[in-house]
Amino acid sequence: MSVAAAVSTVPDRVPITVFDDARVRVVLMLDVRDGTQAEVLEAYERMCKRVAAVPGHISDQLCQSLENPTQWLITSEWESAPEFLAWANSEEHLEMVRPLEPYVRGTHSMRYSVLRETAGADAGERAAARGALQPRPRIGDNLVRHAVTWTVKPASVGRVAEILSGYTSPEVRVDDTTRLLRTSLFMHGNRVVRAIEVRGDLQAALRHVARQPEVRAVEEALNPHLEQDRDLTDPRSARLFFTLAALPAVHHVMSGRETGRDIERCALHYPARPGAGAALARLLARQGEAAVGDPDNPVVACTLFHRDDLVVRLVDTVAAPDTAPGAVLALSDPDARAEAGRLLDAAALGVDGPLTDDRAAARLLAQARMRPLTDRRAPVA
């Protein structure tokens, strides 16, 4: 399955995906407080053995700048992106890196898949044994996609929908190179999903949005309604909340078709059976590419978000989604629907019966489709 997901079915399009099973290199830049270099080294040595035991971890290095003793970085290598993301967005990760917190003024994380490497013959053989390389360069337009998700108290669903439908949009310009392009908010039951599109530096955009007074007011208004308590004035509480709320974009593909028509966006909620989230995400990535590559259906782009046992897809169409439910769900193929039936938590969606009959796609689309709250786009620059 992983090999099929790595090869785009859309001509001349290379999907942005974590499912090519390429090794991953992570660079974490640290701005260390003056005079605490010995403490940083000691804290790193306490945590590195624990990190080494995380599934998918290959190696890491702690480095110090030749020019500036307060500039450090940690580079780590992972067998694949899904394994790294599962750890990076976990409470276990926050607990492991906590010893470094008192000595660090700020951090900046960058994640890369390994496309090519040059080494001696023996080193090359050892590298090949560690895992695959990314097969082809991905083609992008400096646009980054990310989402967060959280649940609210069931009695608060109506009030939360009201708050999120009426907020004032933040300033879209972050700096000379970064701009907030689009924010889409959806609900399914008591679950909220906020998806954003950023041109430039995602972390800079997230910091910028968090500082905006209108956003802070909305977050404060939401606090009493959340199932998970948080205190956004406490950096540790805020970091925990948003780490556990992160819903990374793991696959994106677009057709490149010139439509000349209005595009409709919908969001779909796919709860997986315990432990089946990764398999379901891979299935939907593969089938979603086939849907985008078919010029006879209305799907022109889709973005897949995944963590743990939750999968969410944003789908852009040139016609109403219910005109082609199988394509919109990425489950047109009967075999794919049968496989999805084994992976989906159908009871959580309120879907009865097998997914293999002709009416199954329409039934599933009606239950999986999320309620749109807002879809804010930046003005054309």
Image (spheres, rainbow, N blue to C red):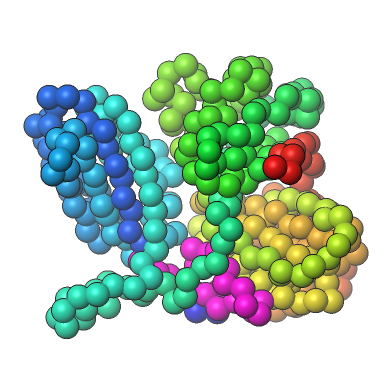
Q: Residue at x 55, y 54 (%)?
A: 142
Q: Residue at x 49, y 44 (%)?
A: 201
Residue 207 in picture, x, y percent from top left? 49, 31
Q: Is residue 110 left or right of residue 268?
A: left
The quadrant of the image that shows the C terminus is: top right
Q: Residue at x 52, y 75 (%)?
A: 6
Residue 300 visible in rendering: yes
**287 is within the stretch colored magenta:** no
Q: Is residue 209 left or right of residue 65?
A: right
The answer to which of 270 and 219 lies nearer the viewer is 219
208 to 357, vertically: above or below: above
Residue 265 in picture, x, y percent from top left? 78, 52
8 to 228, vertically: above or below: below
350 to 257, vertically: above or below: above
Residue 71 in picture, x, y percent from top left? 21, 37
The answer to which of 151 and 125 lies nearer the viewer is 125
Quarter of the image where one finds residue 186: top right
**14 is within the stretch colored magenta:** yes
Quarter of the image where one finds residue 225: top right
Boundaries of the magenta span: 5-23
Residue 155 visible in rendering: no
Quarter of the image where one finds residue 80: bottom left
* Magenta part, dominant SS: loop
Q: Is residue 145 left or right of residue 92?
A: right
Residue 274 in picture, x, y percent from top left? 54, 55
Number of numbered markers = 0
Query: Which residue is at the far left?
Result: 38
Q: Residue at x 44, y 44 (%)?
A: 89
